[in-house]
């Protein structure tokens, strides 16, 4: 969702399916940085396959890869930026780490929180439809994330973390 928001915000282009990489791809310029936005079309737990193919093709070092994903252990609407962190049980992140053979990439995590209903399946929670209030919060979160991404690209991780008010 964030990549769709970002592309719409900065460009009139749209994602194009690239079967060579089993992904939807858009090439854009953000803060004078050429960027490749990628939405793997693989199953989420195989997303590392697409990421590594694209990184190799475009000669993108793992340290230049930024992975955007949802995080159950972060409160809804919160954003956290880190490198070299664990996968937190997220199978897509496990796949990316395995295929890049490192965790030296930026994790741009969007908090979705955990379901409050006991026994609620995580997959149902992650894929559930959002209400208007949640969509409004996500829109605000994405606006903050877009600004933090610009700071990350221009001034680095620490400055972007400071922009988000992170202590670590």
Image: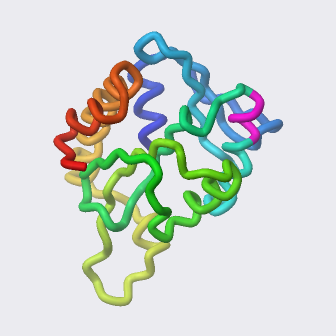
Toward the viewer: 168 or 134?
168
Residue 131 position within the rendered picture, expressed as x and y whole percent measured from the top left: 28, 57
| Image point (35%, 51%), residue name | 110
Is 55 inside the magenta-drawn segment?
Answer: yes
Q: Quadrant of residue 75?
A: bottom left
Toward the viewer: 38 or 34?
34
| Image point (44%, 56%), residue name | 85
Magenta range is 53-57
Quadrant where the image shows the N terminus: top left
Q: Residue furthest right?
A: 20
| Left or right: 91 as drawn, with respect to 21 | left
Please tell me whether the stretch drawn in magenta is mainly helix, strand or loop: helix
| Left or right: 126 as drawn, with respect to 59 | left
Is 116 inside the magenta-drawn segment?
Answer: no
Toward the viewer: 123 or 168?
168
| Left or right: 25 as drawn, with respect to 108 | right
Q: Total marks drawn?
A: 0
| Image point (73%, 50%), residue name | 49
Q: Residue furthest bottom?
A: 119
Q: Is residue 29 above or below residue 146?
A: above
């Amino acid at each position: 969702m964030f990549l769709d928001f970002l592309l719409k915000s900065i460009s009139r282009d749209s994602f194009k399916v690239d079967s060579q990489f089993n992904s939807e791809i858009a090439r854009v310029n953000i803060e004078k940085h050429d960027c490749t936005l990628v939405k793997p079309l693989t199953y989420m737990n195989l997303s590392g396959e697409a990421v590594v193919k694209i990184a190799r093709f475009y000669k993108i070092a793992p340290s230049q890869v930024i992975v955007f994903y949802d995080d159950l252990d972060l409160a809804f609407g919160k954003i956290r930026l880190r490198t070299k962190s664990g996968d937190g049980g997220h199978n897509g992140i496990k796949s990316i780490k395995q295929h890049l053979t490192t965790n030296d990439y930026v994790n741009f995590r969007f908090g979705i929180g955990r379901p409050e209903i006991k026994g609620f399946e995580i997959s149902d929670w992650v894929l559930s439809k959002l209400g208007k209030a949640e969509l409004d919060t996500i829109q605000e979160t994405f606006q903050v994330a877009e600004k933090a991404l610009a700071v990350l690209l221009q001034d680095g991780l620490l400055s972007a973390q400071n922009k988000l008010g992170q202590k670590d």
